[in-house]
Image: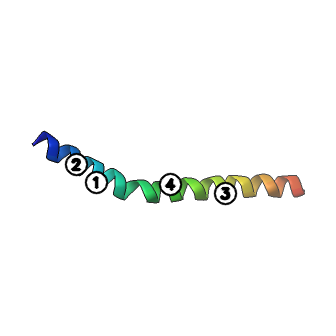
Amino acid sequence: MYITYHLQKAALLMILTPPAAVLINIRLSMLLGINEKFSLH
């Protein structure tokens, strides 16, 4: 039981991690874009 639960948790992390990483990258790029806009002005 415990092993299967652990595997399910690992599988969920593997499924959920890429979208989270993409969202973090988008937020970082947005922050960088805002910084670039401020530096341009």
Q: Can you tell which of label 1 and label 4 is closer to the viewer?
A: 1
Circle 3: residue type: Ser
Above or below residue 27? Residue 2 is above
Q: Can you tell which of label 3 and label 1 is closer to the viewer?
A: 1
Characterize the local packing of mark 3: few (<14), some (14-19) or many (20 or more) Cα atoms within 10 angstroms: few
Circle 4: residue type: Ala
Q: Of the numbered discs in the image, which one, if any, rests on residue 21?
A: 4
Circle 1: residue type: Ala
**Circles 1 and 2: CB distance less than 8 Å?**
yes
Left/right placement of residue 22 relative to residue 17 reads right
Instruction: Identify which residue is drawn at 72% across, 53% down.
Output: 32
Sequence-wise, the earlier of marks 3 and 1 is 1
Instruction: Identify which residue is drawn at 60% across, 59% down.
Output: 26
Q: Mark 2 = which residue?
A: 7
Distance (Cα) linking label 4 and label 2: 21 Å
Characterize the local packing of mark 1: few (<14), some (14-19) or many (20 or more) Cα atoms within 10 angstroms: few
Q: Of the numbered discs in the image, which one, if any, rests on residue 24?
A: none
Q: Mark 1 = which residue?
A: 11
